[in-house]
């Protein structure tokens, strides 16, 4: 399975944008990039996913490099509720979708 | 919709005891998953199911068993609990599967301690 690399942790100021990087240099042509986040003491929740084009939804934006070897999750205006561990995951599909979670990126939001 | 529910929330087991972690989803999802999360780590897949009557092993299946008799329920059985099974267990479900991937919905977790 292709792997992803993320920073262990990041800090952001409240109400400012947050850019969460993810490297996936061994990504294959059909691997979709998925992002989940895990708030303290909760199960993970889906954030966004994409293949090649940049994607937007109500939670975040996903910017994917042209060579697809990296991507960036963008939270446009961080709130205290966005403090969580963010996981960048390459969707592994062999007849079923198995999410391979790494350690993720712990985002701290400073008031 | 309640989504994915798990019981119990917390449990302490003695070494060698057995228990069943319950998971139920009310979204009519075919696919269900069990993950475990050790402190400071990401989630690891234990077992998954693609529909009633069909289950398969994930990354770390040893020491666990599952069954899927209905679409809604996917219980995880621990036989002969060991300290290495101390973890937080998450159940998840998804509508389908495909190259693009489907959003997985997670339950709140069961925190299990084996002493």
Image (cartoon, rainbow, N blue to C red):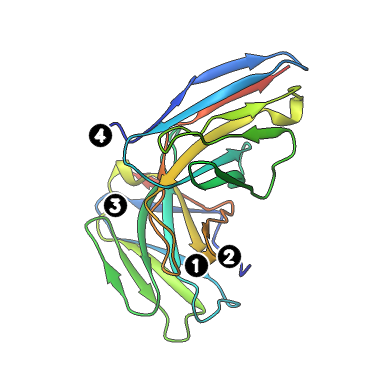
Task: Pick whichever of labels 3 and 2 is earlier in the sequence.
Answer: 2
Residue A101 rendering spot, x and y as whole percentages: 56, 53
Q: Are marks 1 and 4 on the same chain?
A: no
Task: Answer yes or no: are tags 3 and 4 on the same subunit.
Answer: no
Question: Marks 1/4: CA distance?
Answer: 33 Å
The kind of secondary structure element at disc 1 is strand
- Comparing marks 1 and 3, which lies closer to the viewer? 1
Please rate how many residues cluster around mark 1, counting C-alpha atoms within 10 Å: few if below 14, some from 14 to 19, many from 20: many
Label 3 crowding class (10 Å Cα cut-off): few <14, some 14-19, many 20+? many
Residue at position x 66%, y 34% in the image? B65
Can marks 1 and 2 be said to lie on one chain? yes
**Proximity of marks 3 and 2: CB atoms separated by less than 8 Å:** no
Cβ atoms at labels 1 and 4 below 8 Å apart: no
User: Mark 3 sits on what residue?
Assistant: A78
Question: Residue B1 shows which numbered tag?
Answer: 4
Q: Position of residue B115 (x, y in %)?
A: 73, 16
- Quarter holding residue B60: top right
- Could you tell me which chain the residue with mark 4 belongs to? B
Q: Which residue is mark 1?
A: A22
- Res. A65 mark: none
Q: Is residue B88 left or right of A80 when viewed as pictured?
A: right
Q: CA distance from mark 2 to mark 4?
A: 35 Å
Chain designation of label 3: A
> At 40% from the left edge and 56% from the top edge, which residue is drawn?
B96
Marks 1 and 2, the one that precedes in the sequence: 2
Q: How far is the residue under mark 3 from the one under mark 2?
A: 22 Å
* Residue holding disc 2: A5
Gap in Å between the C-alphas at discs 1 and 2? 6 Å
Task: Say if B78 sits above or below A39 in the image.
Answer: above
Mark 2 or 4: the one toward you = 4
């Amino acid at each position: 399975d292709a792997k992803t690399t993320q920073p262990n942790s990041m800090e952001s100021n409240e109400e400012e944008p947050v850019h969460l990087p993810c490297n996936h240099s061994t990504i294959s042509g059909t691997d979709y990039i998925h992002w989940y986040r895990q708030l303290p003491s909760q199960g993970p929740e889906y954030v966004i996913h994409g293949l090649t084009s940049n994607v937007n939804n109500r939670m975040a934006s996903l910017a994917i490099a042209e060579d697809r070897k990296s991507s960036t999750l963008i939270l446009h205006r961080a709130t205290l509720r966005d403090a969580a561990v963010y996981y960048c995951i390459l969707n592994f599909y062999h007849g079923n979708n198995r999410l391979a979670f790494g350690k993720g990126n712990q985002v701290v939001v400073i008031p | 919709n309640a989504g994915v529910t798990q019981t119990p929330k917390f449990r302490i087991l003695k070494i060698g005891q057995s228990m069943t972690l319950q998971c139920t989803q009310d979204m009519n999802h075919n696919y269900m998953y069990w993950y475990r999360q050790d402190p400071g780590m990401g989630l690891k897949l234990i077992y998954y199911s693609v529909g009633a009557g069909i289950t398969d092993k994930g990354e770390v299946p040893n020491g666990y068993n599952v069954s899927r008799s209905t679409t809604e329920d996917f219980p995880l059985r621990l036989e002969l609990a060991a300290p290495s099974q101390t973890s937080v267990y998450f159940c998840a479900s998804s509508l389908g599967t495909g190259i693009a991937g489907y959003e997985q919905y997670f339950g709140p977790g069961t925190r299990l301690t084996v002493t």
